[in-house]
Amino acid sequence: MPGFLETDIKYLKGVGDARAKVLASELGVATFRDLLYYFPFRHIDRSRFYSIGELSGSDLPALQIKGRFIKFATEGEGAKKRLVGIFTDGQRMMEIVWFSKITTFSTAYKPGVEYVIFGKPNYFRNAYSMVHPEVEQFDPAKPPTGFRGVYSLTETMRKRGYTTRLLQTLVGNLLSMPGLASVDDTLPADVVRRYSLMPVQEAFRQIHFPENARLLQKAIERFKFEELFYVEAHILRYTMERSAKIPGYLFGRIGEKFNGFYFNVLPFELTGAQKRVLKEIRADMKTGRQMNRLLQGDVGSGKTMVAFMSMLMAVDNGCQSALMAPTEILATQHFETLKQWAEPIGVKVALLTGSTRTAARREIHERLESGEIDIIVGTHALIEDTVRFKCLGLAVIDEQHRFGVAQRARMWRKNTVAPHVLVMTATPIPRTLAMTVYGDLEVSVIDELPPGRKPVTTLLRYDNNRHEVDLLISSQLKDGRQVYIVYPLISENEKLDLKSLEEGYERTCETFPSYKVCFVHGKMKPAAKDHQMDLFVKGEARIMVATTVIEVGVNVPNASVMIIENAERFGLSQLHQLRGRVGRGADQSYCVLMGKMKSGADTKKRLSIMTETTDGFLISEADMKIRGPGDMEGTQQSGLAFSLRVADLARDGQVLTRAREAALAVLRGAPSLLAPGCVVSQQDSGSSFVMKVSENEISVMKSELRVRFVHSVDWSQIS
């Protein structure tokens, strides 16, 4: 026998077989639980009536107006046939339009009777109208009061006569059923008490039919907490389970190579942030468990130095290290840098890429397997089955979002003992996103730049400033500097009013004929792309015209100008990444955002954020609030691996922090947060999750987390 929440929705008063099929196919509502968790997307105050004269603007929310119909008329023929009612609030008039069930509606409402219409006003031809609004007769003895939820409905449902009012009725019928009293809270009782959360039964009532704004907010906060609690519980359970099961190399000593480099070779004083991160890495490597750490830091913050010194810890403990980069250009640059640092202390570094010749590749394979090579730098070539190590102790993945999960995993399956893992990114990730997308990793942040580094001057300019921008480019070229010009498109597109690389390359060659211009885009063959990029790296080409393929993987300290055409087409985080290509040397550098004069105020305000700060974390927070977490460039290959119905990672950082704290305490079996003997279990699609909790015992019986009550997160999508 299914429990109350698992009851088929067709057994709810007002549903039946026909409506059950529509609710399941259109909204995914197949059970009582589904309907309870089908929350309103917003709420309106039904005690307020608007007048037609108050309406202003073209993007109005759904609202209610009290008045009378004057007359009805049928217009058009066939598929264009419609019923039009003229509705007045006593001062002004508006059209009410129905495109389906015309016969039904033409007889349902009478002229002269007082009604309340509820719907979204449309502004067309200098007048307002409503299409398929909810209409109910006004009863002076029972006027509409309080807040009511507004539910998302598909177009198919609207055409069949389904309304928000119907959903309200169905939810009301469900909330009035005695069986609701048997529904246990989805969270441990002590968690509810400790964090002053609304109990789940009351929260269901208040989120669907709130008594007032305060109780509505409490209900929303309750479900946000619940949603994020179970997201974090899954991530933390996985992390704790992995930590308990996967041993790592014990790096117990700091030895000759590390100390020799630190005291005799290090070319500059480490920043406080670099020292802090090295201590965090050192602490991980002393535990005897595999380190899994994400290292965040802006371009130029010194991540590569931290990675190299971490590799020296491995060398001092008899192990090898590998650094994998997404492009041959970047791998080669890393190799040259590390080789320069390593040679004075006798550490052997090698480079392995797809371009490495067969004889050299065979020699590198032999030297790796014998342990003669201490540090190997490379691209995807490092994860080939033919690459074997004598003892791989540390794997460093640069710009880790450029590699798939399976590709990264192949690196640390090279040993019987898992190597420590350090993944690096120059894409600043908002804290809330890092706690979810990368929640199974410990996070280190380098949040300061080396002293003496000049911040990049960022300018917002438009086409009428083109001559001014050309003068800036010309002056920098005369001073011996190099310039990037980035375009959103490769070729001209008639449907998009955007600048393209091809026309930009021609214009650049004509405008600056004395300088060699190279070009790079994503559709070029790798060899051709590498040749063009090499021209720029060596300084033979002074201007590079490119698409965003240069966002990662080019380190040219002599480049001092970055021009980004149609900057409004890029996310803030991507603009910040592009800006990071300049400002790598000692000279003052410039980033010019070329926008459209006709851009809206919001677009100009968004771009102005780039001119006000160079702090990548502030920019990434602003970007996530604007674009949403699933669209953040560079954070994950396919956005978030789960969907959130209530919580918002861009705005609910405090809730997430509290939810993570509670989930961690529960998984650790903290007596103060979980009643002894609590058992949560679920059979779902053939799999089960059982968490038996006593004061000092937690056992997780299934690697895939499935939670009994939370229906608002798609757990099947979490890998």
Image (cartoon, grey):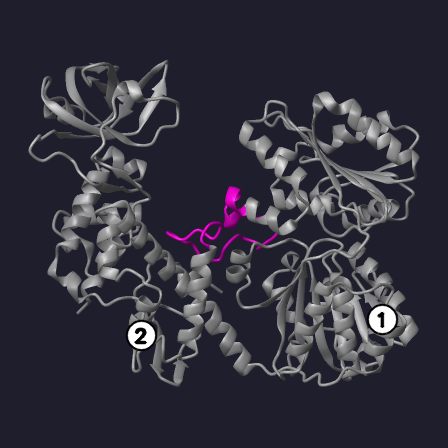
Residue 657, position as x, y percentages in the image: 46, 62
Front-lying residue, 206 or 339: 206
Q: Is residue 699 above or below residue 135?
A: below
Whether tag 2 and tag 1 are in contact, CB under 8 A, the answer is no
Q: Nearer the viewer, residue 321 or 341?
A: 341
The kind of residue on which mark 1 rests is: Val
Q: Residue at x 28, y 60 (%)?
A: 198
* Residue 41 showing in the rendered view: yes
Q: Nearer the viewer, residue 137 or 160?
A: 137
Q: Secondary structure at mark 2?
A: strand
Q: How many marks?
A: 2
Query: What segment carries the magenta color?
Result: 624-652
SS type, badge 1: strand
Q: Answer above or below: position of 293 versus 25.
A: below
**Residue 458 vertical placement versus 708 (above, below):** above
Please state if 612 lies on the left or on the right of 94 as rendered: right
Residue drawn where x is 39% and y is 27% of the image? 59
Q: Which residue is mark 1?
A: 349
As drawn, the residue found furthest toward the left would be 141
* Residue carrying label 2: 680
| Residue 432 within the segment the image draws in magenta | no
Q: Quadrant of the N terminus?
A: bottom left
